[in-house]
Amino acid sequence: MGTDDADRLVVLEERYSHAQRLLADLDGVLFAQQRTIDRLEARVRRLEQQLGELVPARPGKAAALLTWRARAPWGPCERHEHSARPRLRSDRAARPPPARPGG
């Protein structure tokens, strides 16, 4: 094996070692993020359960609040029509129309 081949082998081994370190680092980051996601999901479930316990007198409202995430996971938006809260005719009458950009 010539010196050029030996040098190429050393460079390839260094790259491989570097890739292994990066992979190990990324694995640690992914593990920590998954742990955080699991904790947040458990917290959301607890909050949904508590919300269900707080609003038992109006089951329709409680069900609507508990399914809010499924309908609008991005959250309520008063500026656009995709608000998580259903619009009522009285809302449209009481609220002025949204301002148009540049106008």
Image (cartoon, rainbow, N blue to C red):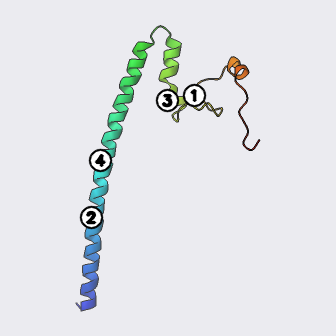
How packed is label 1: few (under 14 Cα within 10 Å), some, or many (20 or more)? some
Instruction: Please tell me whether mark 2 sits on a helix, a strand or a loop.
Output: helix
Q: Which residue is mark 4?
A: 31
Q: Is residue 100 left or right of residue 67?
A: right
Residue 49 x, y percent position in the rendering: 38, 20
Front: mark 4 or 1: 1
**Displayed quadrant of residue 14:** bottom left
Q: Earlier in the sequence, mark 2 or mark 4?
A: 2
Distance, label 2 to label 4, CA atoms, is 16 Å
Distance, label 3 to label 2, CA atoms, is 39 Å
The three-letter code of the residue at mark 4 reads Phe
Q: Earlier in the sequence, mark 1 or mark 2?
A: 2
Q: Which residue is mark 2?
A: 20
Q: Earlier in the sequence, mark 3 or mark 2?
A: 2
The residue most toward the front is 103
Instruction: Please tell me whether mark 3 sits on a helix, a strand or a loop.
Output: helix
Q: Is residue 1 left or right of residue 41?
A: left
Which quadrant: the C terminus?
top right
The three-letter code of the residue at mark 2 reads Gln
Front: mark 1 or 2: 1
Q: Which residue is mark 1?
A: 84
Distance, label 1 to label 2, CA atoms, is 45 Å
